[in-house]
Image (tube, rainbow, N blue to C red):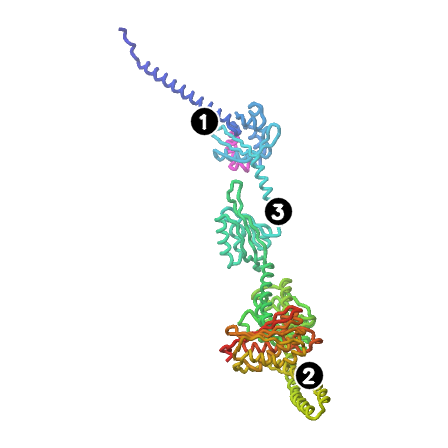
Amino acid sequence: MPKAPRKTPEGRRGSRSGDERAALLRRLAELEEREAHARHIVQMAGVSIWEEDFSGVQELLLELRRQGVGDVRAWCATHPDFVHEAMGRVRVVSVNDATLRMVGASSQEELLGSVERIFLPESVRVFIEQLVALAEGRPFLQAESVVRTLEGRRLEVLSTFSWDAVVGRADRVLVTLMDIGERKAAERALQESEARFRNMADHAPVMMWMTDPEGGCTYLNRQWYAFTGQTEETGLGFGWLSAVHPEDAAPVKAVFVDANARRAPFQLDYRLRRVDGEYRWAIDAAAPRFGPGGEFLGYIGSVIDITERRRREELQRFLAEAGTALASSLEYGTTLSTLARLAVPTLADWCMVDLLEEDGSVRRVEVVSADPSEALLAEQLRRFPARPDGNPHHPPSLVILQGRPVLLPELPTGRFSTLAHDEEHARTIAATRPVSLMSVPLLARGRTLGALTFFTTARSGRRYGAVELEAAEDLGRRAALAVDNARLYRDAQRAVRLRDEFLSIASHELKTPLTPLVLKLRVLARELEARCEPVLSRRLLGHLEVSRRQVKRLSELVDGLLDVSHLSAGRLRIEREVVDLSALVREVAARFQEESERSGSPLRMEADGPVVGQWDRQRLEQAVSNLLSNALKYGGGHPVSIRVEDIGEWARLVVRDEGIGIEPDVLPRIFHKFERGVSERHYGGLGLGLYVTQQVLQAMGGTISAESTPGHGATFTVDLPLAPAPEAL
């Protein structure tokens, strides 16, 4: 069997060398495969990828370093030729297909070599940044730039530069270009939209603001800064809260934070400091903003100064309250004092009321201060009312003289002598520290009754304007009407008292001769019957009967006047006793029998039995007589029915006639004093009978009512308690 060849050391070494070559070949194949795969990926990528040779550029940078140049950016700024030379040393090694499509090249050969063909002047800035990054040893740079296609079209691109991207070749640079034209266009459109919004917002008549999702303010329009005096540095973020009144800031922030957490719209009122330091009421309304995907972007809101509106609403409420106070009393002194206290502090820090008396003098009826500690000063001001013969520039005096309002939005500090009657008056005015004043006349029926004067002080710092003056004039008109009505009522009451006094005296004086006249007529009738022949006696007795009826009628009228005077003076007395209403009505009806026959209206009475109660017999007879007299007078020759009945604890009397009736517009007034249901030309009388009847019945705890249809008569119903109420005993 042949022997196998013996391995020699050289043979073993030859075998290892073969293995190493094989491994190296496999490694090279893998690298080539990976490089091919990488190049395939590069070619298939949708982003422009360049491989550039920067070795020439590196040589220039090394030369600068040898020359001691440390600031490459500054060197490039002062040596543009160096930049141009460096740009010319950049060599394009390869590009992918996306690059060819981007720049409009048909093949790589069109781009290989210099990159100057696609560079624009705007590209130089980014190239300088590349040089700086290379000099500083930074391996990566990203920047926005502009390039141009081979057709000359501009492209906005995002460029990235990576050094050492190719293994072992430090002088090579991998560049990517991403077309960001659409994104930049969208950004510009957004910026233009925002610029338009800001322009509109800055010219809007209201304050506007915007926030980010966290609630920080990112925008305040020009009106906000003009109103508050803030700047962007002091207003953005949460700085705007410093312009809110200290008492409102915490609640406002709490509402805003809560709404921001819930992404909900909100609206709230608060006081906002104006640039002059005055706090003004504002309404802040806002709505959340959401992006296309529903993401919360923050809020947009508006702020409107509503001080004038709130002031008008407040003044309207004040005027309504003042109107109620003015209508609550006819004692105008008390009413005006109440009015002055209502005006402070709603309308003023001080209020003064001057009234013009009938003798031409002026009386200061009230002085009110918002500060109770100034009571002594208020008493001093009482000593200086308006004086028509005093300083004509004194506002209340001027108002009373001319009947026109005076408005002084700003009072001259320290120059109150021009407004005062004398130096003492000027010192008193100065002590109140007034800053703004208005005085309005009390005008009624073309006459000036006085003046209302209001002024604010340094304590509140408020200034009067057209809104306040309008409210003050309205208040002056209402107050004047109240004063005029009160004076008219006072004069009317005085006239009524004089009338009642006259009626009382006149009725007593008239009653005095009537009593002996009645007696004389009776004596004369007896003498005629005894001494005269029958024919003459009958004729004369007829004349005497007419006289007797007229005297009786006159006596009834005088009795009515006496009753009215007693009622007005509160001297009507009720003497109660047990009375049978049925029997009393029969007695009264019997006395009216002759009148019933004369008028052609028969009396028909219905009563089931006695109806007994505790009443004043004489007054009850008077009431029944008045009702029967009216029924016969207006019955028109038709029957008059009378019904008496017991209805439990009450007695009821119903008197009905079938005559002319009462008109509906007159019916509610027939129980009033001196009121009549018909013309006195045809029926006579003073219009007191039903008034006295009602007053008498009410004094006994009863009531009376009337129902009527014109042309079909009238029905009067009287209800009387059978027993008096305990307090009437």
Task: Give the camera-side residue of 715 and 181.
Answer: 715
Nearer the camera: disc 1 or disc 2: 2
x, y percentage for residue 704?
58, 73
Q: Which residues are magenta?
A: 57-75
Q: In the drawing, what numbered circle is on residue 550?
A: 2
Q: Which mark is residue 168?
A: 1
Determine if residue 11 is in view: yes
Query: Which of the labelled discs sits on residue 199, or is there none?
Result: 3
Q: Secondary structure at mark 3?
A: helix
- Closer to the camera in the image, 123 or 83: 123
Q: Nearer the viewer, residue 22 or 444?
A: 444
The answer for how far apart the CA atoms under marks 1 and 2 are is 151 Å
Report how far apart the C-alphas of labels 2 and 3 lie in the structure: 99 Å
Q: Quadrant of residue 520?
A: bottom right
For the residues carrying marks 1 and 3, which lies nearer the camera in this image? 3
**In the image, is residue 68 part of the stretch drawn in magenta?**
yes
- Give the amino acid at mark 3: Asn
